[in-house]
Structure formats: C-alpha cells, structure tokens
Image (tube, rainbow, N blue to C red):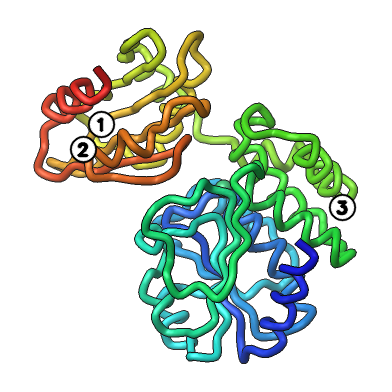
Amino acid sequence: MKEFLNKLIVSIQKCDSVIIMSHRYMDLDGFGAALGLYQIVKKYNESVSIIINKEEQDSAISKAMEKIDTPISFLTALDAEKRVTANTLLIILDVHKKEMLECPFLVDQTEHLVVIDHHIKGEHILDNVSYSYIKDNVSSTVEIIVDLLKLEEERIGSIISTIMLAGMYIDTNNFNIKTTANTYLAGAYLMQNGANNVVKQELFQEDKKNIIRRQKLLKNSHMVNKNMIVCVLDKNIYTGTDLAKIAEELLQFEEVEASFAIGYVEENTVGVSARSLGKINVEKIMKCLGGGGHKTDAAARMPNHSLNKCKDILLEILR
Ligand SMILES: [Mn+2]
C-alpha cells in the first residue's frame, strides 16, 4: 500500500489536474471515499474535483453535501468533459468496470488512469489503467482511503469523517458483512477525527411514508429454494434505490442467503435488484437478465417486459 501511495503522489504532482469519479448511482461509500481522497490529493495538487450527478443523486448524498463545511470542487459530467486533458489524472473509486462508471467516455480522454476498488475483479476491467489498488477482502473503498490517510498522517474534518463512516456502514450492512479487525480500526480512525453517529443517522433518515410503503411491499415476498427470497412489487413505478433498499431489507429474513426485488422502474421496463450475503453469486444471476454488478450486489433492467414475465424468467433461473 505504501508503494501504491508513493506512486499515486508522483502522479498527482506530475499531472495538470486531478478528477475523482465513482460509479453511476454513486453511493455513500464512493462519495465518502472521494471526499477522503480529495484531502490527500489537495496537498499535492490544487486542481482537484469530484464528479457528481445531481439528477441521479442518492438522498443521503444530497443531505451530506448540504452539511459539508469545507470548500470542495464538484463537477458535472459536462464540466468534466470540458476540463479533462490528456494530462489529467483520473482516479476511479469503488468500481473497475467501464460500463458502470459515472462518465465512461472520460476514460478515453486521458493517459493517466488509476483505480481504487474493493470489488471482486470481474470481466470487462478497464483496459487502459496505469495502475490500480483493487483488494476484494476490504469492506469498502472508504476503508482503503482511511488506510491511505493514516499513512499520510492526514487529519480530516468531522463532517467528512462522518460521511466516510456512513459509507462504511452502507457497504458492511452496519458492520455485519465483509467486516474485519481493520474495518473497525478504520471506523475508529474516523471517530478519532470527529465522526458523529447522530449526524450519520440523520443522513440515513428518510420520509416516513417511503419507509412504510417499503415495509408493506416486503409482504409480497416469498422464499425460493429455501435460501433465496423474491419480492415482487406492485404495478407502480419505483426508483432503483427503492429496489436496492428492499433487497437489502430482505437479507435480514431468516435463512435468506440472497434476495431479489423486482418492480417497474419505468413504464414497460422492469428493474431487478439483487443482494447476497456472500455465498450465492448474484452477479452471475443478474447477467442472465442482461445486467451486472458484483458478487454480493447486482442489478438488471429489462425493457419491454411486463412484471409478470420478468418474475417468471427470474424464477426459472433461480430454480
Ligand atoms: Mn463500495
């Protein structure tokens, strides 16, 4: 890791500017990691920005952004496209597949590409990466960034520490999945830097109506093969985040090793969100539906399909 950090610092100093980018539908792990890394980059290069997408923003990230009390340069995809040159260092966080990036086209516009990720390496890895740090035994990208911050002996503010801690909570399902001694040490470091659990909870708070609506939908779920659960939503249109949250909640049910939430995300387009505790590879299953993702966390979108038809196809694959 020390070697990686030294290399990264050289790249940061050598390049004209640095752009940090995560995956589409960025989550708090990607966002927290970006904010933490920003603190390191800023020390060596003043020209650093983080790409955000306000149109598809997670409500927790919108709340987090309102709380940030230090100047951070955020860019839209459009701004980034104007800003990027062949001598821009593009650092990609929490993802290593081109098709999942917030702005996949940026990758072809620079010669300096670094990836930091904690997902199991799949096919379609970005091909023009200069070098990378991909460790799939680490809980979250935030955990990797905390280790870099420790090496740099860099202190971070209370709000950013809180957002980073929230990212760790998301990716570990409250320190239950992929959690090691080092995960707790990273959490401890964030607490030492002023992370606040009350503020963290505020980031996760949601509209009461939303939560109740989701809880009601959980009733429409049934077990498949004794270790998987499928929840079929009603005919209303839901967001990808709704589906993901339902799939996550289903993992709390006894005997469930993998969960699937299926519902309309647009008229005539059905979305499926899948989660696994680790044994069942849901990426493989989502690939059969034309989707993708990671072993424990994947999704698919099926245009021109009815909900019933999609449910039947999914059940066929599961059985
Ligand atoms: Mn992550």
Q: Is residue 78 above or below residue 59?
A: below
Q: Residues within 10 Å of mark 1 (few under 14, many from 20)?
A: many
Residue at figure coordinates x 50%, y 72% from the top left: 129
Q: Which mark is residue 193?
A: 3
Residue at figure coordinates x 35%, y 35% from the top left: 273
Q: Is any part of residue 210 visible from this angle?
A: no
Residue at figure coordinates x 51%, y 69% from the top left: 51
- Of mark 2 and mark 3, the one earlier in the sequence is 3
- Of mark 2 and mark 1, the one earlier in the sequence is 1
Quadrant of the image containing the C terminus: top left
Residue 15, image x and y in percent? Answer: 63, 89
What amino acid is at disc 2? Val
Q: Is residue 259 above or below residue 271?
A: above
Q: Secondary structure at mark 3?
A: loop
Residue at figure coordinates x 72%, y 76% from the top left: 7
**Discs 2, 1 touching: Cβ within 8 Å:** yes
